[in-house]
Image (tube, grey):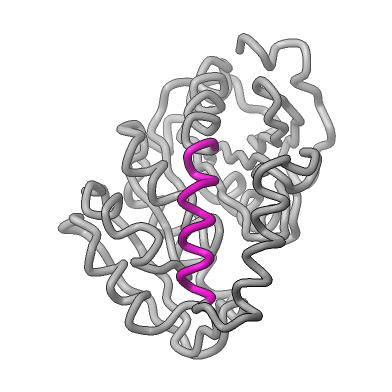
Amino acid sequence: MHSTASSLTDESVTDGVLEQSFTVGEVPGVLFSPADATSPRPLILLGHGGGQHKRAPGVLARAHRFVRELGAAAACVDVPGHGDRPDHPQFGPMAARNQQRVEQGEPRAQVIAQFQAVVAQQTVPEWTAVLDALQELPHVGAGPVGYWGLSLGCGLGVPFVAAEPRVRAAVLGCGSALAGAEQAARITVPVQFLAQWDDEFISREQSLALFEAFASTDKTLHANPGGHAAVPRHEIDSATAFFGRHLEPLATAS
């Protein structure tokens, strides 16, 4: 695993799920897998939301579900300026300026989109390197790959999925066409897209425009009432079933 070989560590085993910390270059992450895993299996990459980190409660809940119910591995890394990563010399000041722009009346969705486009220039190659490294592990291997990400995880995930041919299915949402329409038009894998109908950050029109932009012939829109952070808990059931359909073979992993 090249840069992770000396830093891949056993953290804990909970309900049959092994959590291992790792680093790839300067990127810290956590890998979730069945505690008895010895052979290749599907890998689901999780993109955390803004202000969160690789061990946020929602990340842990989804990762454990994917491991226990699908026999898959799952992984999440800290985005620059989040979690165990230091303040970023460019992104930190930019975020502060963006807050001022919003307070001065600029549309929040447009400001967020511009910021995510800049951050994605760093995160896309980082996540590619992480995927390279994880797939060298014997209990992960070069199996099918999925991606899950909402909000910031969508804004950074769309360009990653567009650029990464190993990703075979993606759950995305709470994102705007302002941030990713051009990249979304290059995505042809199955997509399940979540939209919050009363999102205070992303307009309904921009959310639906992003869904429309995906070139996938197999794409499904899940629209739920509520604000940006009010994604219903049952959507994790839908995501688990979605990856179960598209990330085969799952039953052969051991």
Q: Residue at x 75, y 20 (%)?
A: 8
Please name the residue shown 67% across and 28% down the image: 36
Is residue 244 covered in magenta?
no
Left or right of residue 218, residue 146 in this image: right
Q: Which residues are magenta?
A: 108-122
Total marks shown come to 0
Q: As rendered, which of 98 and 179 lies closer to the eye?
A: 98
User: Measuring 35% from the left and 32% from the top, which residue is drawn there?
Assistant: 166
The image position of residue 77, as x and y in percent, is 65, 39
As drawn, 106 above or below 164: below
Tell me, yes or no, whether the highlighted magenta stretch contains residue 114: yes
Q: Position of residue 46 (x, y in %)?
A: 56, 48
Quadrant showing the C terminus: top right
Q: Quadrant of residue 62?
A: bottom right
Is residue 118 found left or right of 96 in the rendered image? Answer: left
| Residue at the limit of the structure toward the left, as seen here | 217
Q: Residue at x 71, y 46 (%)?
A: 54
Q: Where on the picture, by quarter, is residue 138?
A: top right
Q: Position of residue 195 (x, y in %)?
A: 42, 76
Residue 81 x, y percent position in the rendering: 73, 46
